[in-house]
Amino acid sequence: MSSPATDERSEPLSTPMSAADIHANARALSGYLREKSAEIEEARKLPDEVVRRLREAGMFRLMMPKEWGGPEMRPAEQVEVIEEVAKANASAAWCVMIGCDSGFFAGFLEDEAAREIYPRLDMATAGSATPSGRAERVAGGYRVTGQWSFGSGVTHAEVVELACTLYENGAAVTKGQGTPVTCGFLTAASNVEVVDNWRTTGMRGTGSCDYSVKDLFVPDRFLCNIRPPARRPGVLWRRSTNFLPKVSGVPLGAARAAIDYAVDSVKNRVELPSGRPLKNSGRIQSVIAEAEMMLGAARSYVFHAMEREWARLENNERPTIRERADAWLSRVNAAQAAREIVRMLYDAMGSASIYSERSPLDRALRDAETVCQHIVVQRKTLAMAGAMLLEADTPLLPYI
């Protein structure tokens, strides 16, 4: 039987944390995370000590409800925290971005079940939204079998999401024109087998391994459909995609770190063969200026779109087509712009960029390329956002 998560690694913290406290904690972790970057990448997951430090800093409680003592942070506040972590290490920031979904999922469960699966505020959740599992209806719940990919943080999470297609009496449950019904389930990480197959170009430290279960019984109370209306009344749960805005924090923070590194690096270097200080090079000056211009524009678009959509939700109104499209496009733009910024800086710094032990730009480039392959920031989704703006008949992503 599926049991609630009771991992001793996530003992409650006695001191409540505000959004400002958590942001300050993220800044305080910067030096430590930079020092651990090589270890994180080599391990292909976050080491236990790194996870402990993130947990103690409140990084996994960003979306926990105020009623429980959590900060219930607005999307803009979440992005600022994740940006701060990403300036130090993109993989750690990605794990924070995914892991803090705990509070969001909790809002779509009955409160008693939510408190059972999340007995503490600082619990990380992992999972995949792709319905790669099969859930057969049985008395009192479901029997779940499947294997899922891209389980970011599954190596340290306490709770795992299982996205499934529903079956009853051996046949797929359908709706409308025969469309299969899908939903998610939450279970303790101890019920899940991790498949150690995360060997990638970038974002190596996220531990985004496959994970599987076989004939796992999940009680009805842990069925978690992130579709409105939610069980909680807060603004954070008024749109089923309110967990997506924070994705932008990773590329924005990583790009900021790359620019800062390049600026600091050129101050004491000379251009060859002239021997002229590199900071006096018009080529370098132009690259730095363009990088700042691109990052500033991308960041402004993200926060403008978030705040406008949030204001609509605060008024208990549905975001307009334009607002939904901007929310999506700003996230795609943030990742794509960050990749271009890192590429520009990598080229500008020349051969010094290629040494992974000397320059963070090597890892930054690999991380940026990998981030841009995630479905929520891939360029191929631009057509779907364009279809919304054109009121075309093209099917949309369910979470756009």
Image (cartoon, grey):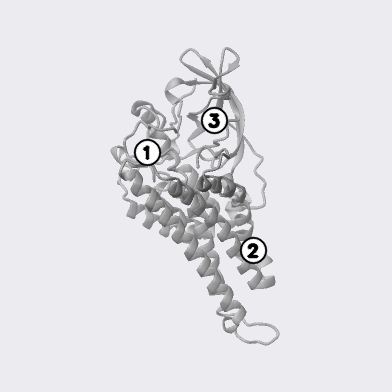
Residue 42 horizontal side relative to residue 31, left or right: right
Of the two numbered discs 3 and 1 in the rendering, the one whose residue sits closer to the viewer: 1
Mark 3 and mark 2 in contact? Answer it, CB < 8 Å: no
Q: CA distance from mark 3 to mark 1?
A: 21 Å
Mark 2 and mark 1 in contact? Answer it, CB < 8 Å: no
Q: Can you identify the residue that label 2 sits on?
A: 357
Can you give x and y, in whole percent of width and height, for residue 255 in the image?
53, 62
Disc 1 secondary structure class: loop
Can you give x and y, in whole percent of width and height, for residue 47 in the image?
54, 47
Q: Amino acid at mark 3?
A: Ala
Tag 1 or tag 3, which sits nearer the N-term? 3
Can you give x and y, in whole percent of width and height, for residue 367 in the image?
60, 55
Q: Can you identify the residue that label 1 sits on?
A: 238
Disc 3 secondary structure class: strand
Q: Amino acid at mark 2?
A: Glu
Q: CA distance from mark 2 to mark 1?
A: 45 Å
Q: Dot 3 surroundings within 10 Å: few (below 14), some, or many (20 or more)?
A: many
Residue 91 against residue 283 in the figure, above or below? above
Tag 2 or tag 3, which sits nearer the N-term? 3
Q: Can you identify the residue that label 3 sits on?
A: 163
Residue 46 visible in this rendered orientation of the protein: no
- 64 or 375: nearer the viewer: 375
Residue 296 against residue 141 in the figure, above or below? below
Residue 388 horizontal side relative to residue 323, left or right: right
Of the two numbered discs 3 and 2 in the rendering, the one whose residue sits closer to the viewer: 3
Of the two numbered discs 2 and 1 in the rendering, the one whose residue sits closer to the viewer: 1
